Structures are given as structure tokens and as C-alpha cells.
Amino acid sequence: MLNLLNKFVVPDVKGVDIYQDDDDPLQFWMVPQPVRLSTGPDGQPALSIYAFARDMSLLAGIDKPLPAGETEGGILSMSVESTVGDEDQRKIVEYLRSQVLSGALGSLRPVWDGSKVVTEPRGATQGDPKLGYPTWLEGDAQFCLPSALGPTFVKGDDSKAKPSLAGSNVASFTIALGQEGIRLFREGAKSGKLTAHVAYTLQFMARVPAITVTVSGNANNVYQELKDHTTVVETSDGVAVRTYPQVSSLKELKNISGSLQVDYTRFDFATGEDKLREQLEAFVLDITQAYLKNIFAQPVINGQLNKEKLGTDPMQNFKKPDAPPVGGNQLWLKEFEQSDIRDFGMTFHGSIARPFSAHPNAALVAMVTKPQLEKAFTEADLNTPIFHTLQVPVRVTADFANDPIAGIQVTLDYRQTDDRTGEVKAASQTYDFVKGDETYYFRTTLAKDAQGAPKDTYSYSSRLHYKAAQQSTDIAAQTTREKSLIIGYDRLGCVDVKVVAGTVPWAAVQSIQVDLKLPGVNLPSAAQTLVLTEAAQEGGWFSYTGGQTSQEYEYSCEFLLKNGSRLVTGPDRTSTARLLIDAPFEDRMAVTFVPQGLFPPLQSIVLSTKYSDEAAKYHTEGTHVFANNIESWRWEVDLPDTKNREFQYKADITYADGTTAPGQWQVGQEGTVLIGEVKSSLMEVAVTAAALDMTKWKLVVVKLRYEDPVTHEVQDETFQLTSANAGQIPSWKVTLKDPAAQSYTYEVEGYGTDGTRKSVPATSTSDELLVLEL
């Protein structure tokens, strides 16, 4: 059997303790201290680190944001063993052969003689050394990553495992890592640094050499000391109410009981063997405690002692008042007193086999190289499925309440061959729609092509059941890859058109007549006329297509204008389900007419306008009467052709004396047009008193007058000049029909500061700068 003493290590072999066998001189036992990663058939470490992105479709639907939490995770899979490598074993065997078994080392060997273990010097021993591992009795293995950091690092208790306790003593871990844990491993793989390690706790059977244990002391003294320190836990309803100290080591037992003498055989352990020394002391403690319990901790036998002397039961306060006291251990009845004046003693001698502990461990980065750690790291996107599935929501948009449709059947078929396996994937389903608000889901597993891409093409067909028609209509199958199948009228062998008025100048348009028809279809519903007005701007048309696949229809429009004219467009063709009717006007023209002349003598100006587009068969007219020269008139015309912007106008003038001046039609241009007595020129006269000594003149009055030589229209102005405003130069503006007729008259009256008065009679001139002189 493996013997606990005379252990040694082999030079150049780190972390391996060699124990001798006290039966077989050729048998040696290896207890490794480091932990190693197991290797697979390819010689690579049994280590895999998987980083994965979670399937986000399981975290939230497409109509909701992702919840707060982890979207990444990891799985660490590894197998470790508590073994010695082949190269180190070779060194150990060579050392045993050359140094130990040859007798060259002169070491000691424990020998079991059948009753005890003795130590003998090793001499030369024939035979080859045999290596093995101890018989492991119990054990645990734990992967250690700072779990105190929380579940975002390590999930659950996956970090603990039971080793095999046989062979290479393998322990395997499959550990779930949180989002921060896998990121820590990723950075560790890059840097080759990681705060993680594996620790074993193992027990193996070993025999200790012949040992003598002597326990002695004074019974009364030891009893009192033990009584004060005995471990007792008193409870009530599972709740601890009193606890006494616990003895956990031989040294502590000696400290609390100075009257107790414990002696045992001391062994010369090698330097650093504190663990073995502690384990041997624990063995001595067990022997001592067993002996002391036999003497001092036997239950009191009822009848031998007066119960009243036993004192109060520690639990008596929690029992019924009339319950009799119960006898108990004489050590924990603190009020109980007894004495025994005598000495006691016990001696144990022999060799004992008992379990001893070993704690192999190693950091993860010490068991694997940085390249191996990087190679073990694998990324997986869990959003990529292994088996691709097709899920198609199927809906119809028919108006069952208002259109003559009783029901619709839609059939979806999927049939594809997997190019990799040759397996045929097939699925078929028929859905009935009778209300229009149903949604069905077609689901199937998809076949794949040679590159592994899913084949997602399927076919669908429809059957319509009409309210008025006895026969149903079958719509031939069509192939598609749509992920959401919406069956509208365009796929059901009928048309359903909503006609809506768009941009229409209802101030000019009275109504729109829209004629619709399906070319080549001889059915009563294949043609219809709708009338749109400002009050009713929408209409509808439904018809069967008679089995033809085209949804194209023909329409034309006739616009009835409020001025009585009509404007026709079309025919045009389209397949839209919503027909927007806009007025056939490309643009709008605006003209502002401004009256010219004096009212009176003018009494009124009658304006007539007209616009015509012969290509569009469109014309419009306008009339307006001006009674003053203050208000203008804006005339707006909708244009079928934006390039055709020419119009005509004329102005008929009536004077206050009853005479008239008929106008002539003339071409106008968009913008502002002057009508009436339009002036063709403007004369501006500036008046200056710079030639006068205004210190002599209190007031100077200037009168200006212009008379049109043809119409005798008079325009006049009067200026008053004083010393206060003489430095200003007033101006007089005159409109001229004839630019050459610029002659005007002026008169000047001067009032002197001395009371004198001087005048300049009416004088004609055409000067644009009038210099006053007196």
C-alpha cells in the first residue's frame, strides 16, 4: 500500500510527488500537483470555446424592440486530467532505476511487516520500477472564474464536476458563460492572459508508519475544562438559541484543556509538508476525541442520579409547563456538578491506513498555449438556422360585403428536391376566405441547393365563388418567392377600381364624366360610366375579367366646364386599382388688368378677354367693368398646354358726357396689362428757388399747368416756397400721351418782407428744370 512517509521528488520533474509502497519495493505512486488538459485523437487539447449571438427572433417580435439584457453568450467545453506526462514518466523511471533501485541514493523505504510499518535502508533491488496513481477515494473538480462578478460571467453551477477517480482521473466541464464572460475569454484568447484555473480536491488511501498516541490527565480538571468548551447547539422550532465553541484541531484542544496531555510519535516530514503534518495531527485528534467522548460524554442513565441535581433542561422553557424534565448529556447540563478525583490514561500503538488529501490545480493559460487558445475559440450566429423554414402569411383584400364575391379559396404548394440529399420536400394547403379579415400561415421545411442555400420558391392558385354567378372562376397557379402573400383583385380574375377626383379646379369645372370598360370582355359589368362632382368626388367599378389574365382597362374623361365648354381626354389604358382623375390642365396663367385715366371724365371701362386652345378644343372668356382707376382685376386661366399662353383683350371706354371710345382686340401677354387712357410717357419738372434772395421774400407761390393738346386733359400743381423750405427742390410729374407734347405754363407770385408784391404772368416753357426769378 502507498505509504505516507519517505516521499521524494525527481529532479527536472516539476509538480510530481513520488510515494513508495510498503509491500512492493518496485512499486511507486505518483501524485501530480498540476492539472493538464486532456488531448483528443488529433493530439489537440480537449478545449472548445463557443461564442454565440442569440437568436433575436426569440427575444422580441418584429413589432417590438429588443429587451434590455444579454444578446451574446458562450459555452466552454473542456476535459482535464490529473496525470503525469509521458516525458516526465520516462524521467521518473530512469531516476528510479539509476538512483533509487540501484541503492546509489541510499534512501529509506517503509516496510509493512504484517502488524506495523518499519523503515529500512534501500539497497540494490532487481527489477524494473512500476509507476501508478493512488487509489482515489473521493474527489471534486472546479473551474474557477470570478463568479462573484455575477451571472453575466458564469451561469449557474456548471463550473463543478466529479472526476472519474480512475485512470487519468478525467473531469469534464460544460460551462455556460454570460455576455461579459465570453467577452473576457475573447480578450484572453487575444492576449494569452486569463484569470481562470481548475482545482481538484482528491482523497487517496495511505498508510502511516507505526505511531504511538498517549492520552492522559486528571479526570476532574479535564471534565470541567471540556464542560466549559463543549460544542452544543440548542434550537427551538429550528432556530438556534445557544451555541458553544467547537474544537477543530489538536492544538486548539490542548489550548482549551491545559490538564489534558496528548503525546504522539513525531515524524521527520520534509520541508514544505505542512499539509501532511496537519493531516497526521487530525488523525491523532480523532483518536483523542474518541477516547474522551467514551469517558466524559456518555448519556446519564435515569435512576442513577437525582433528576433535581441535573438542573434545568435547556429546552424546558419551550415545553409545556407540566412536561417532566428529560435527562441528558452531563457535559451540556451546565448547572449539573459532579467530581471524580482520579487520573486517567490511554496508549494507542500501531499502523493505520486512512484517507489523505491532494489538491492538484493549474491556471488555464498554463495548460494551453496562446495559439491553441485562439484555435479553440469559435463564433456561432444562432440567427442562422440549421433547418430553413418557410412561413408565409396568406391574406386576401376582397370586399366581401360590397363586391359580388361569396368566397375565395387559395391553395399553396411547395415541392422541391434537396440537391445534397436527393430528398423531396413537399407541402400543400388550401385556405378558405369568406369574410376578408382572415390570415392563414403556410409553413414547411425547405430543401437546399448544392451550396446549402434554401429553395424558397412555391406556387399558389385561387378559386373565386361569386354571389350571382353559378360557376366559379379558377385562377391558374403562379410561382413566387413572396414572404407575405396578399391576394388582391389583380390576382383574382376581376377588377375593382376606385375612381377619385384629384387636382380639379372646381371653380371652373362643373362635372367629370368617366367612361370605363374592359376591352374584349362581353359582360354587362365590363363597362360603366361614373360622374364626379365637387360634392361627389369618388366612385367605384367592379367587373369580372371573363377569364383573361390582363387587368388592363380603358378609360376616357369629359370635363364639363361652368362656362358651358367641354374638354375631352383619352381614351387611355391602365391597370391601377385606384384611378386618380386630374383636370387636363398643365398650368395656370394669371393676368392683372390696371385701369388708366381720370374718373371723370371717364365713366367706365368695359374689359373683354378670351383664351382658346384649338388642339384641346378648349376656350374660355371673361368680362369686367371698371368704374374707377383704383381697383385692378385679376383674370386666371387654366391651360391645357403650358406653352400656349397667348390671349386677347379689348377695352371699351365710356365718358361722362355720353361719348364712347370702342376698343380693338389685341394680343396680350401674361403679367400686368394697362387699359383705358394709357399714358405713353412721363415728364418730370424740378422747381428751384436758388436764384432768389429768400431773405427779401416772405412767400413765393408757383402754379404749374399742363393741357393735352388732343384730349385737353389738364394736369396741374402748386408749390409754396419760404425761407424755411427754399433749399428743397420739389418736382412735378406729368403723364404724356404724346411724348413730343411737353409744353406747359407756369405763374409766380412773390410776397416781399417789406410788403411789396411781384408777379410773373403765365409763361410757356418745356424746361425740365424751372428756375424762379422775380
Image: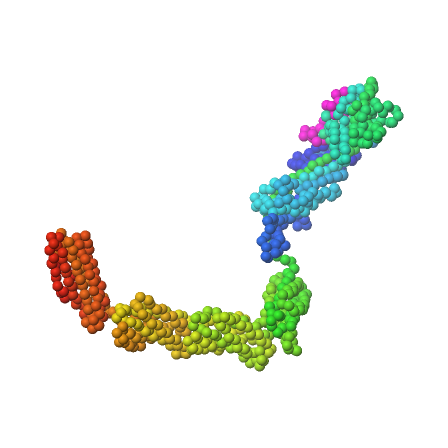
Residue 17 vs residue 745, the one in the foreground: 745
Horizontal relation, residue 494 to residue 40: left or right: left
Q: Quadrant of residue 153?
A: top right
Q: Is residue 261 magenta?
A: yes
Relative to the observer, which residue lies in front, 657 or 383?
Answer: 657
Name the quarter where the C terminus is drawn. Answer: bottom left
The residue most toward the right is: 303
> In which quadrant of the rendered view does residue 769 lie?
bottom left
Can you tell which quarter of the image residue 605 is in?
A: bottom left
Residue 316, position in %: x, y? 80, 29
Is residue 370 something that shows in the picture?
no
Q: Looking at the picture, how far across and down is residue 634, in whole percent?
A: 36, 68
Residue 14 in sight here: yes
Identity of the residue furthest to the front in this view: 755
Query: Vertically, is 614 above or below 59?
Result: below
The stretch of residues the image draws in magenta is 253-277
At x 81% / y 21%, what residue is drawn? Answer: 337
Q: Is residue 597 left or right of residue 96?
A: left
Residue 127 appears at what percent x and percent y?
A: 76, 37
